[in-house]
Image: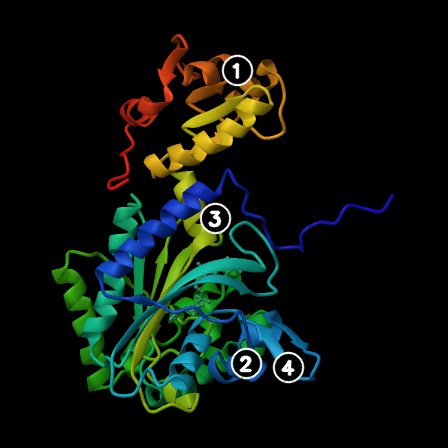
Amino acid sequence: MSKNLQAVRGMRDILPEQTPLWQWMEDRARAVLAGYGYSEIRLPVLEMTELFERSIGEVTDIVEKEMYTFADRNGDSLTLRPEGTAGCVRAGIEHGLFYNQVQRLWYQGPMFRHERPQKGRYRQFHQIGVEAFGLVGPDVDVELILLTARLWRSLGLADLELQLNSLGTPAERTRYREVLVAYLRERVDRLDEDGRRRLETNPLRVLDSKNPEMADVVAGAPSLLDFLEADSRAHFTAVCDALADAGLSYTVNPRLVRGLDYYARTVFEWVTTRLGAQGTVCAGGRYDGLVEQLGGRPTPAAGFAIGLERLVALLEEQGAAHGHGAPHVYLVALGAPAERAGLRLAEQLRDALPGLRLVMNCGGGGPKAQFKRADRAGARYALVLGDGELARGTAGLKPLRETGEQDDVATAVLPAVLAARLGVPQATGI
Ligand code: HAM
């Protein structure tokens, strides 16, 4: 016999027992985003490879090592999106969304990176991404951060830490880079292999090393914040001051460099110590140069993305559980006439009670088998139809989660009785 097929390594199924928590979290996020005037944009999961090379940067881990890239049947090089900002900018330029207007956008969906899978790190993962275009001032950086803080409150998450840094303008970074490279060259013997490679290709990323043996070198490195000129410094100070005004605590982390090349000025991450090594739940910043770099008119921009697997893990860790929306009613239909009448009754009840969750017994079976299925489905009530009930114009209503007798209820008053017992509203105007 052939081996059973399995999901691709690092790509997970989200099972029905998990989806209620996901849906609850997504609903909360949608509500918060609407409260700040953000609109959803839906983007393809495949883009031309060049888009990511030109935006994320050719000498980043993502582009060098992690993309799912292939030639399609026409020979075009396509890539499964490793993140959403590039596609969002591409779409905005293509559809003229940035011309003389402010856009507040969000998107959601799977992203793909061929990383080494471990807890909190997958090859297919999901993000909610949020991007604001056309706003140059620090106020929108603050808005984005306040939005995330509101989402954490709305989800009941208390102990996420906000880390903040400024990466300056490209010119400021170039000057810093020279000084940093000189500093690292003097200590090259203390760098690990990755550090030496990055020293040549993307030296700021050396600061991102998690290797404890390099901690001293990283800690002693010059700080980019000291290389900011007046405008960038004022921008960063304004962000910090506004966050303080809003009562939000944060840590300035001068080693926060981000793994994508498009950032400028403000960058931030929300981190937790509760998830082990993969503790960054949300990350983003400004990327004022990207729209122009991809062929659009100069357009200031800022945004962030939340890693949903990590957010769900955190919610689970804090004991958040959400009932799987068990059915209110399981309709037990005994015999062919009752099965036919049951289908009609079920539709009438769904019309009369829009919030009703009713599962119809399918596949026949005797009373014992059907009651067992009703119980397994987690239903609160069994609604029983048999020849006797049909003759009387009634249905039997039997509680399954508490003790109580089966009541014989006239079908005409069934919607009102169910509405009262279940606390669901009756449809108006029917
Ligand atoms: P990023 O830092 O690459 O930024 O990813 C954002 C978040 O996605 C991370 O903080 C993490 O929570 C989650 N994430 C990333 N990789 C994985 C993975 N392999 N498995 C599970 N979760 C992961 C971006 O993607 C930028 N586009 C964010 C942004 C939007 N910046 C401006 N606008």
Q: Does residue 337 lie above or below 295 as drawn?
A: above
Find the distance from the CA under tag 2 to the CA under tag 1.
74 Å
Quadrant of the rendering where the N terminus is positioned? top right
Find the distance from the CA under tag 4 to the CA under tag 3.
36 Å
Mark 4 sits near ligand 1, with its Cβ under 8 Å away: no
Q: Determine the secondary structure under disc 4.
A: strand
Please tell me which of labels 3 and 1 falls first in the chain.
Answer: 3
Say which amino acid is labelled 3. Answer: Gly
Please tell me which of labels 4 and 1 falls first in the chain.
Answer: 4
Quadrant of res 131: bottom left
Q: Which mark is residue 306?
A: none
The residue closer to the viewer here, 370 or 59, is: 370
Can residue 353 be seen here? no
Residue at the spot of label 1: 387
Please tell me which of labels 2 and 4 falls first in the chain.
Answer: 2
Quadrant of res 112: bottom right
Badge nearest the viewer, 4 or 1: 1
Q: Determine the secondary structure under disc 3.
A: loop
Tell me the residue at 40%/72% (across/down). 257
Residue at the spot of label 4: 77
Q: Position of residue 245 (x, y in %)?
A: 12, 61
Q: Position of residue 111 (x, y in %)?
A: 52, 64
Residue at the spot of label 2: 59
Say which amino acid is labelled 2. Answer: Val
The residue closer to the viewer here, 82 or 244, is: 82
Badge nearest the viewer, 2 or 4: 4
Mark 1 sits near ligand 1, with its Cβ under 8 Å away: no
Q: Which mark is residue 276?
A: 3
Quadrant of res 304: bottom left
Say which amino acid is labelled 1. Answer: Asp
